[in-house]
Every structure is written in structure tokens, then in C-alpha cells.
Image (tube, rainbow, N blue to C red):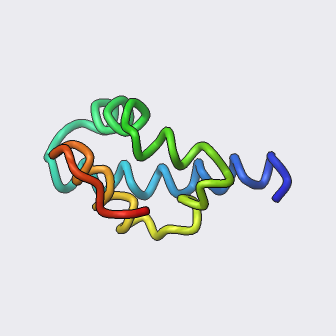
């Protein structure tokens, strides 16, 4: 996939995941963005060949919360 298209796709997925984090944790969007960008889930999402970008925003959100608890659900 061309890099520009990949980065656009990651951005769109990230927006949805952040919205879910805000709703679930009742935190500000800024806090949710910072938490997600610092997460292992986001680190893997940024690497095209991990195929994390194929996952739904819901699955990525589950992975994010699982990692926060110290376990991994996906991959």
C-alpha cells in the first residue's frame, strides 16, 4: 500500500479508537489521544506489515484495554 494511503488509513482508524476510549473511560479527547499514541497497540498499528490496520476499531480498542491490563488479545 502506498505510504500516504497507509498513513491516512491509520489516522482514520485512530480517530475511531480514540472516540471509543473517550466514551469508555470518560476522559478528555486529548488524554485519550496521548494514552493511545503511547500504547503498544498504536506502536503496532503504525507498522504496516503487522497488519493491525486490518483490524476493526473495536478490536484495536479491545487490544488497547487488554494491553493496559497487562495482557494481549490480538495477534
Q: Locate residue 34 relative to residue 66 in the image: left or right.
A: right
Q: Position of residue 45 (x, y in %)?
A: 53, 49
Q: Position of residue 64 (x, y in %)?
A: 31, 50
Going 43% across and 58% down the picture, which residue do you hit?
16
Which quarter of the rendering shows the N terminus? bottom right
Would you place residue 46 above or below residue 34 in this image? below
Going 42% across and 64% down the picture, which residue do you hit?
57
Would you place residue 37 above or below residue 69 in this image? above
Q: Position of residue 40 (x, y in %)?
A: 40, 39
Q: Nearer the viewer, residue 25 or 39?
A: 39
Q: Locate residue 65 relative to residue 74 in the image: left or right.
A: left
Q: Position of residue 12 (x, y in %)?
A: 57, 55
Q: Nearer the viewer, residue 5 or 53?
A: 53
Q: How many marks?
A: 0
Q: Nearer the viewer, residue 3 or 68?
A: 68
Going 22% across and 51% down the picture, which residue do you hit?
71
Which quarter of the rendering shows the C terminus? bottom left
Amino acid at each position: 500500500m502506498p505510504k500516504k494511503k497507509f498513513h491516512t488509513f491509520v489516522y482514520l482508524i485512530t480517530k475511531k479508537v480514540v472516540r471509543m476510549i473517550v466514551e469508555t473511560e470518560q476522559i478528555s479527547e486529548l488524554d485519550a489521544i496521548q494514552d493511545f499514541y503511547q500504547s503498544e497497540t498504536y506502536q503496532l498499528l503504525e507498522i504496516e506489515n503487522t497488519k493491525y490496520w486490518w483490524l476493526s476499531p473495536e478490536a484495536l480498542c479491545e487490544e488497547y484495554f487488554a494491553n493496559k491490563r497487562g495482557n494481549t488479545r490480538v495477534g
